[in-house]
Image (tube, coloured by chain):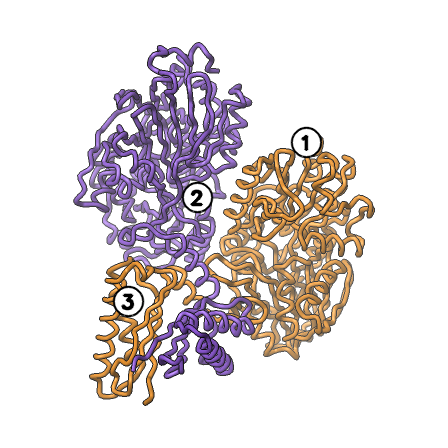
Chain colours: A orange, B purple
C-alpha cells in the first residue's frame, strides 16, 4: 500500500499549505460511456478523454449524449491540455462539441489522433485543432503535471494508460485495458512501468471497472484468430461474412490474414470499416497487399469459396452492412444458403434485441450463422477480475477510485481493492461531478462541480433540453390531440373547435367522441368568459383539463392536449 | 425414428383419402411469447394455449401483444377445446381477450386453472368460463382427438406436456419443460410416458426450443435452495430481501423454507407475489404456517436478522416492489447498509437495462446485492441442449417442429433433430400461420392461415391500429408542431397563425423561427387561394410541407406538423 513515506516523497514546499490535488469525472462514472476525467492542482488543470455515449431507448430521437463541460468552459484559461487514452467513441466522440469550447492542445498516440483528425474533418471542416502526437513512454510536462504514457492492450491498437506526476504524488490512470499476454501487434501492456510506479509509490489509482463481474482472465485477442482459422477450415465451400467492430483493427488484421491464408479475397463493407481500414493501412496499423481487396460490386459474381466479406453491423445498427444484408436490402450483396455469417462481437448492454433480431433474420435468409453463444468468436477488450487484481497489486495505490463502469461495477471494484489491501477509507465510489480533494495528509469527497448529460439531437440543434425529452415521451406513450378555437373579445366562439389527432383515436371513426370534445371546449370557454379578468390562457387551460377528462373515458390514459386559442380582432 | 410401420398403426379407413392432419401456430414461433398452437382434422379443431407477449420498446404505449385469432373465430363451431399446458402469461395471458370470442371449454391442471380463474375474474367479472380440471395421466376425448396429459417440470408447478392421438398418429407437444431430476415437489417429468410414446411411434413432435443454445443440462431448481442456504448462513446479521418471479412457486417455497430454517419471519411484497402465494397456499402448492408471515408494515421495525422479504421486481418492472425500494419510494420499506438483496432471476431478453439500472440503484442505497453474475441464484425452467437431445431420442418422432423460440432457436433445434436422426425433409422450421399438412404418406408446408400480432393498449381501447403506432413513433422521434389558422371564404387570413409545439424547439426562444413559420403559412394560404377549386385541405397540405421545410433549417429532421385550418363563416 502507499504509505506516509512514499506519499510525501515530493518536497513539502511544492505542496504549500492549503494546496490540494482535485480529481473529478465529468463522465464515465455510473455509466459506460462519455468518459472524461479532470485533475486540478493550483492553477493547472488537465483533462483526460472526451467521450460520447449512445442514448437509452427512452431518449427519443437523441443521437448521442456528451458530458456537460460548463466547469471546463469557466476554467478554460487553466486547462494545460486534453489527453486521449485511445480512439474509441466513448473516449473521443465528444471532441467535435467540446474542443471548440476549450481550445486547448490535444495529446494522443498516432492512431488515436488519426481517428480524431478524421472525425473533426467531418464534423468541423473549418476548425483548426492543435493535435500533438505522443508515443508510449513519452513524458510531457503540462503546468505542474508531468504525464507519462504507458502502453496498454485493448480492443483498439495504440491505447495508453497514464502516470501523472503531481506535486502531491503520482496519479495512475489505467485507461481501458486488458493484460493480453499475446497481443496481435506484440505491443504488451507495460507491466514493468506499472510495477515500477507501484514500487515508487502511487497516490491515486483510477482503474477500468468494466469487467469486474467476470471471473478469471480475459482471453487473448489471438484466440479469435484461432477460431476464425477453424471456421475457414470447416466452411470451405461457403462464402464467409464476418461482422466486427470497425475499430478493432487487430481483429480486422486477423480476419484479413485468415482470408489470405485460405486463398480468399476480401471485400470491405460499411463506411466505418472502409474508412478505418484505409486509415490503419496508411498509418501502418494494418498490413495487407492491395490486390487482396475485392470491390464490393464484384462479390456476388465471385466464387463463394474464394471471397470473405468484412462488415460492420455486429451490434445490429439499423443501417449497417450486416443489417441491410439480413433484410435483403443491400445493393450489391444478397445472402442465401451458400453463406456463413460470423458475428465477431457480443451485444453491448442495450443492443441485445437489435443483435438478436438481426441474427434471426440472417437465419431466415437461409445462412448458417456463428454468433455469441457459439463462443470464442469474440473476446473482450477489458480486464477481468484476476487482471484487475494484478493491476492493484502492481500499482499498490494509497487512494483508489474505480472508473469506467456502472455503479455496481464501481462497488464491486471497490470491494476488490479492499480485499487487495487498500484501506476502506481510502477507496472512493464517486458519482460524476463529485470532487475528490487530496491534501498531503488526507483525502475526502467534498464539493461537486456542475456535471450532467447533454443530449445531442443532430449537430444543428446542438444541445437538447430535458423538458423536450419529457414531452416526447408523453407524445410517444399517448399521442397528441390539437384543438383550435377562435373567439372574439367577449370570448364568444366565432369558429371551431377544430380537432386533429396523431397517435391516438382516429376521429373520423368517432363522431360521438368529437361531439363530447366540442362540448368540453365550449364549456371551458364559457367558464373562462365568466371570470373577471379574461385571459386566453384560461380558455387553453380549461380545454386542456376538460378534453383530457373526456378522453380518459375512451382510452386508458389521455393524450397530450395542445390547445390553440386565437383571438379574432374585429 | 418413426417409420412406415408405426406411422400407419391406425387402420387406414380412419384416414380416408384426402383427410389430413393440419398443424399451425398462431403465436410462439419466431418469438418467445403469445404461444398458441392448433391441430385440425376433418371437422375437429383443438387449440393449445392462449398466451400474451410483452411489447418491444418501439411499441410505444402498448401494454401487450396477443395472437390474431381470426381463423379460430371463423371456425368457432369446430373448436372442441382449448388446452392449457401451464399457468405462465405467455400461455394463458390472452384468455381474457380470446376466450369470449371462442366460447369453448378450457382444460388445464388445478394450479393453471386457479390462475386463469383469478385472471378472468379481474378482467371479465361477468364472464362465465367453462373451466375443466384435468390431472397428469388423465385422458380426454375431444372430437377425433384423444388428449393425454403428461407431467413435466418447469419454473411453475403443475405443467403438462400433451400426447394427442389423431386419426393419423400421435402428436406430442412437450410444453415448456426441463428434466429436473430432483424437483421440489417430487413431481418428475414423466420420462416413461414420453419413452413409451416413442416406442409406439410418434407422428409429430413439437418441442420447446428456448434453451437450445445452452450446452449441457439445466440445473435442478434445488440448486437455488442450496445457494439460498449459503447466503442466509453468510449474511446472518443482515435483513435479506429476495426478488423472484411470483409464479415460480417452487422457488417461493424454497425461500420460505430457508427463512424458517434460519428463524426468520417472511414478509410478502408486490401484488402478484401476495396473490400467487395466497392462491398456492389455498390449492396446496405452498406449505407454510400462518404465523411465519409478517405484515409488511412491521418489517422496518422488526430486527433485521429475523426477517426475510419476498418481493416481485426481479425484471426491473417499473412499479414493482424491488424497483420502488431501490428508488427509496416504498411506503413501508427503506433499504440501507443493513440489507442484502438477492435477485433470483436473470433478465428476460429486452429487460437487461431495466434490471441493470435497478441493481445500480440498489448498490447506491448502500445494500449488498447478489445477482446474476454471482451465479446459482437462478436456474432456467427450460431444457438445455442435452435434455432436448434426450427428449428427441425418447420420442423418436417421424416429423419434427421446433416451437417456443425465436427463429434462430428453431433453426438450431432443427439442426439438433437432424443430428439425432430425424430426416432433414421431415423437420420443419415454421413461421406463425404456416400450415403443416400431414397426409398418411407425406407432410408438407402449404397454405397459411390469417395470423399476426394484435397490440393491446389497455383493456378499454382494445386493439390498436398499426398506423397509430407509426404516428406515435414519429411524434417520439421529432415532436409535434400544431399550427392553427382562421380564413374566410376568400381564403383571406382572419386570425392566426397560432403555433404550439411539444417535444421540439420551444418557440418562446425562437422569434425568428416563428416569423418564418408565419411566412410559410401565409404563403401556403395564398397559393391555395389562387387555385380554381378552393379547399381548406389545400391550405393544410401547404402548411404541412412549407412549415416542415422551414423547420428543417433549424433541426435535423422536422417535427410532425398538424395544421388546423378553420373557416370563419360570416
Q: Which residue is mark 2?
A: B348
Question: Considering the image in quadrants, where does the C terminus of chain B appear?
Answer: bottom left
Question: Mark 3 and mark 2, same subunit?
Answer: no
B525 over A320 or under it: above or below: below
Considering depth in this image, is A289 or B67 the residue closer to the camera?
B67
The residue tagged with tag 1: helix, strand or loop?
A: loop
Q: Nearer the viewer, mark 1 or mark 3?
A: 3
The residue tagged with tag 2: helix, strand or loop?
A: loop
Q: Residue A500 sits in which quadrant?
A: bottom left
Judge from the rendering whether residue B43 lies leftward or rightward of residue B57; answer left or right. left
| Mark 2 belongs to chain | B
Considering depth in this image, is B441 or B366 the residue closer to the camera?
B441
Using the image, tell me which numbered label, if any, was put on residue A405. none
- Where residue A405 appears, as percent x and y from the top left, is 55, 55
Considering depth in this image, is A147 or B302 the residue closer to the camera?
A147
Disc 1 vs disc 3: Cβ atoms closer than 8 Å? Answer: no
| Residue depicted at x 30% and y 53% | B458
- Where residue B230 appears, as percent x and y from the top left, is 41, 38
Q: Is residue A510 among the parts visible in the rendering?
A: yes
| Mark pair 2, 1: CA separation | 33 Å
Report the number of discs.
3
B555 over B190 or under it: above or below: below
Q: Which residue is mark 3?
A: A548
Along the polypeptide, which appears first: circle 1 or circle 3? 1
Judge from the rendering whether residue A378 lies leftward or rightward of residue B245; answer left or right. right
| Residue depicted at x 32% and y 50% | B463
| Mark pair 1, 3: CA separation | 62 Å
Q: Which residue is mark 1?
A: A235
Mark 1 closeness class: few <14, some 14–19, many ≥20 residues within 10 Å: some
Residue at the far bottom: name it: A570
Disc 2 vs disc 1: Cβ atoms closer than 8 Å? Answer: no
B77 over A401 or under it: above or below: above
Amino acid at each position: 500500500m502507499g504509505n506516509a513515506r512514499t506519499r510525501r516523497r515530493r518536497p513539502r514546499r511544492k505542496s504549500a499549505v492549503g494546496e490540494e490535488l482535485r480529481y473529478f469525472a465529468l463522465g464515465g462514472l455510473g455509466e459506460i460511456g462519455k468518459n472524461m476525467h479532470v485533475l486540478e492542482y493550483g492553477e493547472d488543470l488537465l483533462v483526460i478523454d472526451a467521450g460520447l455515449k449512445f442514448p437509452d431507448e427512452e431518449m427519443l430521437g437523441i443521437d448521442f449524449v456528451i458530458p456537460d463541460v460548463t466547469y471546463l468552459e469557466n476554467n478554460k484559461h487553466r486547462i494545460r491540455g486534453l489527453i486521449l487514452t485511445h480512439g474509441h467513441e466513448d473516449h473521443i466522440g465528444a471532441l467535435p462539441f467540446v474542443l471548440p469550447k476549450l481550445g486547448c492542445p490535444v495529446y494522443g498516440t498516432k492512431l488515436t489522433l488519426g481517428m480524431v483528425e478524421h472525425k473533426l474533418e467531418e464534423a468541423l471542416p473549418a476548425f483548426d485543432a492543435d493535435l500533438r502526437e505522443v508515443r508510449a513512454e513519452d513524458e510531457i510536462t503540462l503546468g505542474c503535471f508531468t504525464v507519462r504514457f504507458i502502453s496498454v492492450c485493448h480492443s483498439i491498437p495504440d491505447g495508453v494508460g497514464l502516470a501523472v506526476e503531481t506535486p502531491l504524488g503520482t496519479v495512475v490512470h489505467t485507461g481501458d485495458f486488458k493484460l493480453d499476454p499475446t497481443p496481435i501487434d506484440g505491443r504488451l501492456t507495460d507491466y514493468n512501468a506499472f510495477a515500477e510506479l507501484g514500487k515508487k509509490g502511487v497516490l491515486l489509482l483510477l482503474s477500468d471497472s468494466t469487467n469486474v463481474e467476470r471471473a478469471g482472465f480475459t482471453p487473448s485477442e489471438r484466440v479469435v484468430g484461432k477460431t476464425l482459422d477453424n471456421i475457414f477450415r470447416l466452411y470451405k465451400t461457403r462464402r464467409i461474412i464476418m461482422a466486427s467492430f470497425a475499430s478493432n483493427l487487430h481483429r480486422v488484421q486477423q480476419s484479413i490474414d485468415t482470408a489470405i491464408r485460405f486463398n480468399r479475397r476480401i471485400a470491405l463493407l460499411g463506411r466505418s470499416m472502409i474508412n478505418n481500414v484505409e486509415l490503419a493501412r496508411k498509418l501502418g496499423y494494418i498490413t495487407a497487399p492491395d490486390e487482396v481487396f475485392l470491390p464490393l460490386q464484384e462479390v456476388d459474381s465471385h466464387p463463394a469459396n474464394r471471397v470473405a466479406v468484412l462488415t460492420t453491423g455486429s451490434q445490429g445498427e439499423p443501417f449497417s452492412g450486416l443489417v441491410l444484408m439480413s433484410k435483403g436490402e443491400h445493393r450489391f450483396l444478397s445472402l442465401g444458403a451458400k453463406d456463413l455469417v460470423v458475428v465477431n462481437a457480443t451485444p453491448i448492454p442495450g443492443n441485445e434485441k437489435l443483435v438478436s433480431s438481426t441474427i434471426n433474420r440472417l437465419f431466415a435468409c437461409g445462412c448458417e450463422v456463428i454468433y455469441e453463444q457459439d463462443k470464442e468468436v469474440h473476446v473482450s477488450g477489458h480486464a477481468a477480475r484476476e487482471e484487475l487484481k494484478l493491476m492493484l497489486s502492481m500499482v499498490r495505490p494509497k487512494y483508489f477510485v474505480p472508473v469506467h463502469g456502472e455503479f455496481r461495477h464501481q462497488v464491486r471494484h471497490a470491494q476488490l481493492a479492499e480485499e487487495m489491501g487498500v484501506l476502506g477509507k481510502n477507496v472512493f465510489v464517486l458519482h460524476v461531478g463529485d470532487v475528490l480533494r487530496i491534501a498531503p495528509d488526507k483525502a475526502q469527497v467534498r464539493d461537486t462541480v456542475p456535471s450532467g448529460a447533454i443530449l445531442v439531437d443532430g449537430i444543428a440543434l446542438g444541445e437538447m433540453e430535458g423538458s423536450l425529452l419529457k414531452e416526447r415521451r408523453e407524445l410517444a406513450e399517448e399521442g397528441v390531440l390539437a384543438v383550435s378555437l377562435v373567439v372574439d373579445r367577449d370570448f364568444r366562439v366565432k369558429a371551431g373547435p377544430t380537432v386533429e389527432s396523431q397517435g391516438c383515436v382516429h376521429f373520423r371513426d368517432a363522431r360521438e367522441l368529437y361531439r363530447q370534445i366540442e362540448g368540453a371546449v365550449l364549456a371551458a370557454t364559457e367558464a373562462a368568459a365568466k371570470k373577471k379578468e379574461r385571459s386566453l390562457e384560461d380558455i387553453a387551460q380549461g380545454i386542456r383539463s376538460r378534453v383530457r377528462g373526456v378522453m380518459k373515458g375512451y382510452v386508458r390514459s389521455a393524450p397530450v392536449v395542445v390547445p390553440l386559442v386565437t383571438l379574432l380582432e374585429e
